[in-house]
Image: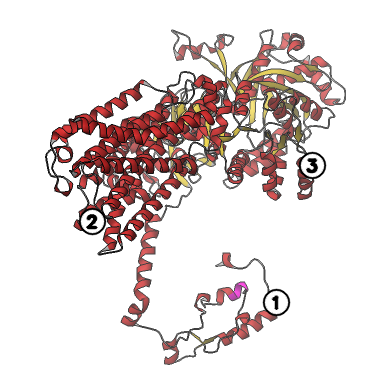
Amino acid sequence: MADQIPLYPVRSAAAAAAASHKRAAYYSAAGPGPAADRRGRYQLEDESAHLDEMPLMMSEEGFENDESDYHTLPRARITRKKRGLEWFVCGGWKFLCTSCCDWLINICQRKKELKARTVWLGCPEKCEEKHPRNAIKNQKYNVFTFIPGVLYEQFKFFLNLYFLVVSCSQFVPALKIGYLYTYWAPLGFVLAVTITREAIDEFRRFQRDKEVNSQLYSKLTVRGKVQVKSSDIQVGDLIIVEKNQRIPSDMVFLRTSEKAGSCFIRTDQLDGETDWKLKVAVSCTQRLPALGDLFSISAYVYAQKPQQDIHSFEGTFTREDSDPPIHESLNIENTLWASTIVASGTVIGVVIYTGKETRSVMNTSNPKNKVGLLDLELNQLTKALFLALVVLSVVMVTLQGFTGPWYRNLFRFLLLFSYIIPISLRVNLDMGKAAYGWMIMKDENIPGTVVRTSTIPEELGRLVYLLTDKTGTLTQNEMVFKRLHLGTVSYGTDTMDEIQNHVLNSYSQVHPQACGSNPSSAPLRRTQSSAPKVRKSVSSRIHEAVKAIALCHNVTPVYEARAGVTAESEFAEADQDLSDENRTYQASSPDESPQVALVRWTESVGLTLISRDLTSMQLKTPGGQVLTFCILQMFPFTSESKRMGIIVRDESTGEITFYMKGADVAMSTIVQYNDWLEEECGNMAREGLRTLVVAKRTLTEEQYQDFENRYSQAKLSIHDRTLKVAAVVESLERELELLCLTGVEDQLQADVRPTLEMLRNAGIKIWMLTGDKLETATCIAKSSHLVSRTQDIHVFRPVASRGEAHLELNAFRRKHDCALVISGDSLEVCLKYYEHELVELACQCPAVVCCRCSPTQKAHIVTLLRQHTGRRTCAIGDGGNDVSMIQAADCGIGIEGKEGKQASLAADFSITQFRHIGRLLVVHGRNSYKRSAALGQFVMHRGLVISTMQAVFSSVFYFASVPLYQGFLMVGYATIYTMFPVFSLVLDQDVKPEMAILYPELYKDLTKGRSLSFKTFLVWVLISIYQGGILMYGALVLFESEFVHVVAISFTALILTELLMVALTIRTWHWLMVVAEFLSLGCYVASLAFLNEYFGVGRVSFGAFLDVAFITTVTFLWKVSAITVVSCFPLYVLKYLKRKLSPPSYSKLSS
């Protein structure tokens, strides 16, 4: 009740009392007695208060005490209650039915409330609630719902339902106009294709589910290990997962065979990232001597309620049988999510979520069905055809004079002309889309391309806006260290040997004590700490910067096993084999790729990371000494904080240091005052370098212990843990000593410049959306030729208010033909107040660069472009932060690259390199659109021709609702006689692929939709009316005495006309097209021997008979030939004249 109370009062106490007095006149409480019991507690008075005297708002007390129903305030007089049968008749039955329906709906739609849970180790029977089975089910239907479900999906569309009604009408004798299979065969064919396809997909899903659910895992019990199926795993079970085995359910990581107490897992099937993730076992259970000791302790895990976020987890581990009880906080590093793969060692975990409550299942959603623009346009044309069908039927009945049962004749005409709407249109287009997808994936010039959404290949040929990510899309995401800046001196790639010499000299001074105490370096540090204002030598500053870079990261060295070396022996020899060339560095996430480049650079200058585990890391100096550092705390990088930190203790000196590095925007406010950081960051960004700021803070033992206590308390919090932990860490991030600024380069991908040039010439406007800083984004835009070097660039000034945004937009409005560069903050302000104006101005720019964009902003920009322009958009990216943008676009393209497969899996099309998008659009996109446009219009033309012939036939015979063709003629016309030649149009092309790539300007014509429009549709309608009229009138004029001559002559001429029209439409012949033409003609000629009912001896329409020899006479042949020539030759002449007088753009290139 409280959440319905107004947030602020509107009346004083006196006003409330007055309102209460007036309210008494409106509602009067009946006094005690029988009369009162009969009339109820409240009764509506005859004289109601005026409307404006009714209370607008009530106090909380008055609201709670009032029992009146404000929905019963109509002025109707209520004198008594209706009871019994009278109440039921007067509307009580509606109330009961509504209540029952609401109750049933609530029962069916009720979802189990997800709650936090306590999970005891190895004791599933102690679970307080019942949890779902750990069974994977991706099937859409079961045995009983398959047929009803598939039929519903088909007949929920109006046209399919229309054909079903037409087919069912043939069971009514008065409406029957032919054989049942005339209407049921095409509909049955379409349904058979759909049901077969769905059945195959459903069976494959069933097999995949069965395979996953039947996988065996080792379950740890009191009696030892037992084998259980994945589907039989329960919450609380202790599951053992071997290396390279899939994790069956969400678990908390308890133990591992690795001595370090950690393991790596692969998460590419969960989040698409290819980098391995480091997971840490619960220290309390990892320290147990044996596996069986897990059952000798009394311990449980308290886990938060199931949720979708795969990057966070809050829980606690508690061991009750110790004194005092042990409490250990759990986070994302202690979890093993389902559908990930163990990459190292053997792990043991306790199951906390199963089945549909696992992270992987909760993040699985039905993808949004994208509908192509071509499909929408064809739907509009189909509606126009349906309107023409109704109008034509009404006209025929009107000309008939509404005599007799005119409504029956109207329905019969609707049936006769039903071929105006082609039932095979959807099947032909779907088969064509499948063919386009196959051609794309088989193209050797774009290897690795995958079509994941087969319903929109034509969208590739209608694009106007291309929105692209920068890192990993335009660039290689292969970081190379380029610059080190110390404030007063800068080192580039040509002076790296100087840094190497400084590092060598620094460690050679402390060589004798490298492995023990370091008296020579200790006084130096004490001197530095006691006199921080004294400028350090360049050598000392380089030494500190390199050491900070070598320590502050989340990178682990990995040593690959050599041939003939077992895992055990390799582990045993790790200490002796740390310098082998088989060392690689593994980052914990794609965001760590710049850090890997930095670690490789420190190795190149002499300080090498050779070992790392959960508690320590080791560095090897140029002289071969090993320095050991104890890892006290680790603060991973997040996209929100844009920085990471680490607290280490030098084992040789005992010094505790807090290192931190991150983006300049995040670090500039937490380092000591300086006058060079902002300027140098801008300079590096203008060179196209990605910058990282490195800083440190030395801590005393007392300072660290105080921090550690507060940090541990915050990590044990169940509620608002993230905020509390962040607040404690923030207390360290103050007045850090700025050590250096690093710059790494992300080189452009191959052929980015010519590809962007090709797309620009194709009329596609390119927008770059990136999270990098403004200067870096601008530099990449210039180097990639997204913005030409002679083109003006308008950098949108930072704005924070509506007035500033207004002034800046006015300044931008006065610029002409310039590229726009805008930051995410300014973009947010402008979209809040001037959304329409900003989008309108930006759409006029040849190129737009949006920097510092969040994933949400990227998706919002795509949506705005679609809504404001109505043009087709395409988004391309390679990282998980691009998924929302890809899914929001009309066509999404993912690049499978360094940042994983998440974008690739979420996209409609997947490519391996950015340069492949050129051929994908200007060749395959263009061909797919033009082919589907021709195929769709030709299928509609095929139905219009035969409907025109039926209309002419009925008009000549006094508007009789009698079919011209029936039985197998109608079925064969749209299938074996014309299907193959018509479908062969999917192989047609107007220009060769090489020509389309050489002249991308041809792509511009497609964006205007000239291949399929109401204009082209009207042309096909006129062609159909002309040909249908010639075919029917020609047959009526040339037939002699038997009506069956009309059927034989007109139908044969119709088939030949359709085959000739396909031949006239084709622009580039393929050998399969020739085969389709002659195959269809051969099928028709061969079928004449079996069509006695229509062309041979037998009873036909109007009771006529015919000698079978007629169809082999010269008379028959010349009449058919004459009609066919008259129906096609004028159209060929007109087409020839049009090509000469107004040739299409592609014909100018091919001539």
Q: Is residue 349 magenta?
A: no
Place residue 1112 in its image quadrant: top left
Q: In terms of sequence position, does the residue under pointer 1 or pointer 3 come before the other?
A: 1
Q: Earlier in the sequence, mark 2 or mark 1?
A: 1
Write down the quadrant of residue 671 in the picture. Answer: top right
Q: Which is nearer the N-term, disc 3 or disc 2?
A: 2
| Point 65% across, 82% down: residue | 17
Q: Amino acid at mark 3?
A: Ala
- The residue singled out by tag 1 in the image is 12
Closer to us: 532 or 915: 915
Q: In this rendering, which labeled residue sits more in front, label 3 or label 2?
A: 2
Q: In which quadrant is the N terminus drawn?
A: bottom right
> Residue 803 appears at what percent x and percent y?
79, 49
Determine the CA span between mark 1 and mark 3.
52 Å
Which element carries disc 3, helix, strand or loop?
helix
The numbered dot on residue 175 is 2
Asked if residue 458 can be seen in this view, the reply is yes
**SS under mark 1:** loop
Is label 2 in a helix, a strand or a loop?
Answer: helix
